[in-house]
Amino acid sequence: MRAAEPVLRVVVLENSPPMSYRDETGQLTGFSVEIARALCQEIRANCAFDVADQSTLLDTVAKGKADIAAAAVFETAERRGRLLFAKPYYRSLSLWLARPDVVPGRSGIRVAVVHGSAQEDYARRQGWEMHQVRNNADLAGVLLGGEAKAALVPMISALQLQKSDPFRRLGLAPTVLRAPELSGDASFGISSRRPGLREEINAALDRIKRNGTYDRINSRFLPFRVS
């Protein structure tokens, strides 16, 4: 049956597995993408998906060029002035990845971060020397190439990196950084031009958690329970 209006513009990342990426056929998929699709189905909206870099994702929604940023976004005072936030759909932690003797804040260490991420914001505030990359998929290359000696990444991205044999051979140890800016409940961002959409998305999120859809998506993409 054809989905009812309205058409919603959903913007996602495409190089952040297992949260959001393209599969072998080029189809956008991943935990965040499939949660967004399930929510669109619940509210009977015809959703059009597009991609953006981490650095432009929220601006795309804030400027009214999209209705939903379907990514794990932390709600901050600054962002509340630009976006609305749905109920949290995921709880995120950030990891410092480095050799055991390379501790956070050590002088002379270049840290790999994704440009536009919460991890980049944190590293900048600490005064750390950074090597910025466009997306999570580029982190392994700069670490393997020696352009950075450490990385600050979401936990789920770190688990994805560990699937690579060359990356594991680097012997990088994970350390959870418990700064409030780097961990906590993450939500989808919603355009402030669509104030009624937040209530629809929140109700739909509750429904997919009750009917088992959320758990099925969780099991498909993530090795642990997130809700």
Image: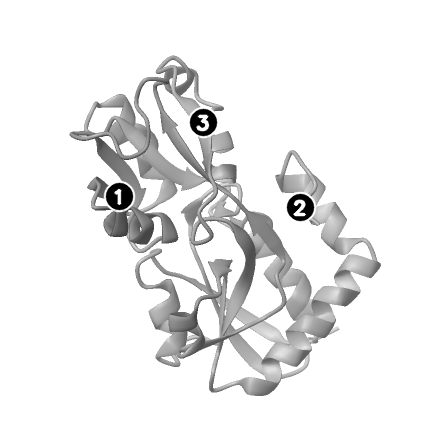
Q: Which residue is mark 3?
A: 174
How far apart marks 3 and 1 lie (CA) works out to: 20 Å
Left or right position of 105 against 89: left
Tag 1 or tag 3, which sits nearer the N-term?
1
Of tags 3 and 1, the one toward the viewer is 3
In the picture, residue 103 is in which quadrant?
A: top left
Characterize the local packing of mark 1: few (<14), some (14-19) or many (20 or more) Cα atoms within 10 angstroms: some
What is the three-letter code of the residue carrying label 1? Val
Q: Which residue is mark 2?
A: 226
The answer to whether residue 190 is seen in the rendering is yes
How far apart marks 2 and 1 lie (CA) works out to: 27 Å
Q: Could you tell me which residue is drawn at 48 percent across and 60 percent down?
A: 74
The answer to whether residue 42 is seen in the rendering is no
Of tags 2 and 1, the one toward the viewer is 2
Which of these two is toward me, 80 or 40?
80
Tag 1 or tag 2, which sits nearer the N-term?
1
For the residues bearing labels 3 and 1, Cβ distance under 8 angstroms? no
What is the three-letter code of the residue carrying label 2? Val
Which of these two is toward me, 203 or 150?
150
Element class at badge 1: strand
Tag 2 or tag 3, which sits nearer the N-term?
3
What is the three-letter code of the residue carrying label 3? Pro
